[in-house]
Amino acid sequence: MLIELEKARTRKNVVRIFREEIDGPDNWTDGFIIAANEEMVLMQLIDDGVHLNGYQILFLEDISDFMHPAPFNDFQKRVLEIRGEDIEDPEVDLDDLAVLLMDISEEFGLVTIHREEVDSDGCEIGRVLRADATTFELEEIGSDARWFDETYEYDLYDITRIEFGSAYEDALLLANEDMGEDAYELVEFDEDEDNR
């Protein structure tokens, strides 16, 4: 698989990756291969509007199949060329998962972490404050663009997918930075407790 991924990278072709056990047979990811090693693959994603939209890291053990080139490869590449959107390497190192999470948080501000075998429907978005060989601590941001008041610790090896640098993550940061003093969760006080 690594040889084929490397061919796709050097030819700058779109690939379509399937993770049937996690996503089912009818879901896939389209994008350009930026880097790959024995454990992970880094892709720059193409969204439904044929724009480059962030990055995704998948684990090779989860990949059930992939197509190279992907369907509509020529069309997608042509549209991106017309729009002047070029493949960009975010220059993150895939050799150490803990270091990788810290680097993404530092460079991009937010990282989206999926733990699909633990929580198939959800994800956590935030910045990694600490990571070691087994766990990581995340300061999370909600869909209202406010930081949570508490941080949370997760198992490093529950991670099944990592995303960063997308328009949605940029939007969360933009809205949060505009909130000023309201950038953290608004704590609701119990009126009965206040009157004691």
Image (cartoon, rainbow, N blue to C red):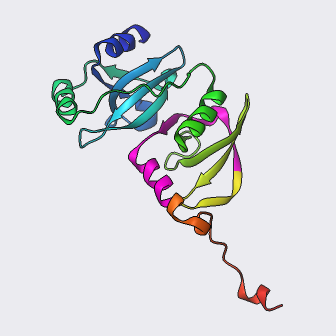
Residue 188 in view, yes or no? yes
The quarter of the rendered structure image containing the C terminus is bottom right
Seen in the image, is 84 located left or right of residue 166? left
Height in image: 165 above or below 40?
below
Q: Quadrant of residue 15?
A: top left
In the displayed image of the protein, which residue is found farthest to the top?
3
- Could you say which is closer to the camera, residue 68 or residue 183? 183
Residue 176, percent from left and from top: 53, 59
Seen in the image, is 150 located left or right of residue 106? right
Seen in the image, is 169 located left or right of residue 153? left
Residue 129, percent from left and from top: 69, 42
**Which residue sits at x=62%, y=63%?**
184
What range is drawn magenta here? 152-175
84 drawn magenta: no
Q: Quadrant of residue 19?
A: top left
Residue 178, percent from left and from top: 50, 62
